[in-house]
Amino acid sequence: MLKNVFGYETFRRGQEEVIDALLGGRDALVVMPTGAGKSLCYQIPALLMDGISIIISPLISLMKDQVRSLRENEAAAAFINSSLSYDEYLQTMRRVRAGEYKLIYIAPERLSGEGATWLDGLKVSLVVIDEAHCVSQWGHDFRTSYMQIAPFIRSLPLHPVATAFTATATERVKTDIVRALGLRNPFHITTGFDRPNLYFAVEKPENKMRSLKKHLRRLKNKSGIVYCLTRRYVEDIYAELAADGFAAARYHAGLSPEERRENQDDFIYDRKTIMVATNAFGMGIDKSNVSFVIHYNMPKNIESYYQEAGRAGRDGSGAECILFYSYADVKTSEFLIEKSAEESGSAELKDYNLELLKYMTFYASGTDCLRERLLAYFGEKPPNYCGACSNCMTRFESVDITVDAQKIISCVYRLKQRNRRFGKTMVIQILRGSRNSKIVSEKLDSLTVWGIMKDSSEKAIRGVIDFLVLNGYLATSGGDYPSLVETDKSGEIIFGKKPLEMMMPCEDAPPASTAAPPPADTTLFVTLKALRAELAAAARVPAYIIFSDAALYAMCRRLPVTRESFLEIPGVGAVKAEKYGDAFTGAIRIYKNRITV
Ligand code: ADP
Ligand code: ZN
């Protein structure tokens, strides 16, 4: 079935074990990173077991995508969710009752009310809960509709095998999933979280927009997502990119459902290559040829970051995950956490979320191997050098910043003596000896600290200030325009009790190169991509549903011209070989002839 229906020769890590457990009648909890191939773990048992399988999934787009893929391989699947018209719903239900489907995808909201009556007389062998972390308060995406799942399972006459899937779960979330869903002695597997084909980078751009455009120009013709923290950011960045001629689309919860659907389709059908979005976009997007994910703002925690960044490179081709870091984003996240704590009234949840934010901040501001940081968060013990992240590619040296720190903190004290408080930018300008109108009118140029860091760049001073704030030697206070204030620890620095060292990139360090770029676009790749686009348009499905980029790359490497050799390409099963074999081998043959002539 693996080869015949899905076109793959070998299982990926963990897939076979899960399939065995389910076929053996055992419940399961499966934690595998995005792109690991979770769907196959339940689709194969669903097709092999007698009776039907119910797949509960929170996102309409995901269901559509999966059903489209299954149908492309001639597997009997359907979905039930709010995107169906009433007539379509009735028709689908008729066919469900007639036993025409093996797999039924359904939204959790649809489980309520009627209980399982709509399944009367049908044998449900398997219930799959996708994105199972949504059942836990401690997950990053709790949904009340998920609380209906356990009662639904209990209401079924024959207890089915239940299996919960998620890409991210801490120990706490895992325990919660098993309890909340009532899994019975589940087979449990957590495969490694590493995604070797992803390159991780953190950048601290002086001008985020300029850096973003530079990356987008470099990544021309590739598909990617730009994640922002708020709708406002999405609107601004989208407008700026569109005005500059980039093929961008936008997505956030404030847009109408129609527009969201349209923009999402533009992206998955490759009409637009760049998606600017809040975290509302992505869960359930199976687009396998996403080559980069750029975070314009730092997310609130590592789980969200890894899940969002992990939408790159699903098909195993090289892809990049770049995070833009600025301390302002930490403040914004703190603010959002405080606000939602006020609404929920849970101080415990607030502390927990602030703790997660701290870990995320250390990821973004530290100098350790980024992959190590990410994997350690999920409880793995990876080596401290991966060679494919921006920190591993940069040489850092330890720099003594005691004197600079003393100057900066002195400045904050001097301002305090004058009953004045200022934000970072003003403090930097005073230290660098600016004579802007405010400084002149308030006679701040008479301060002893005025101009004592004339020879340092604004960026360098800002770096030290951020370091001091992050490590508690200074703090920021106040709402929209926070001021720098001293802390209990400030004195230690002023009185020279403690030398301070900070890791900084070496001056002579080569610019962090971008590791593992995907294979270059060869002429054949371009030809096959065009052919795929044509077939996809005719079948009215996104291109990656026909074949993934990884499959096209494999064709370029192996140049199959017969049906047999075409079947050996990963992702080519019997159905697809029959449907598309001639077209692709034909194109490859023409290419081969041309280069041998
Ligand atoms: P997940 O749900 O875990 O994020 P998917 O189920 O969407 O991941 O699978 C990601 C990609 O990997 C898909 O393109 C899928 O076809 C492919 N894939 C799954 N299993 C295998 C396998 N055994 N060999 C090769 N590719 C696979
Ligand atoms: Zn690394």
Image (cartoon, rainbow, N blue to C red):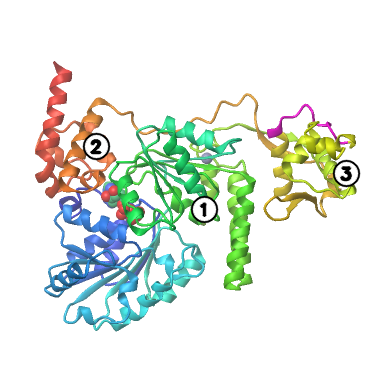
Report x, y in % for residue 403.
82, 36
The residue labelled by disc 2 is 552
Q: Is residue 153 above or below residue 61?
A: below
The residue labelled by disc 3 is 414
Query: Mark 3 or mark 2: which comes first in sequence?
Result: 3
Q: Is mark 2 within 8 Å of ligand 1?
A: no
Q: Quadrant of the N terminus?
A: bottom left
Q: Is residue 493 above or below residue 516?
A: below
Q: Is residue 225 above or below residue 190?
A: above
- Quarter holding residue 496: top right
Report x, y in % for residue 224.
39, 42
Query: Mark 1 or mark 3: which comes first in sequence?
Result: 1
Q: Which residues are magenta?
A: 449-459
Q: Nearer the viewer, mark 3 or mark 2?
A: 3
The residue located at (65%, 26%) in the rendering is 507
Report x, y in % for residue 514.
47, 32
Q: Amino acid at mark 3?
A: Arg
Q: Amino acid at mark 2?
A: Leu
Callout 1: few (<14), some (14-19), or many (20+) C-alpha neighbours within 10 Å?
some
Left or right, 431 with respect to 78, comes to right
- Whether residue 11 is visible, yes or no, is no
| Helix, strand or loop under label 3 | helix
Residues at marks 3 and 2, CA–CA distance in whole angstroms: 64 Å
- Whether residue 344 is visible, yes or no, is yes
Q: Quadrant of the C terminus?
A: top left
The residue labelled by disc 1 is 230
The residue located at (37%, 71%) in the rendering is 186
Report x, y in % for residue 379.
52, 57
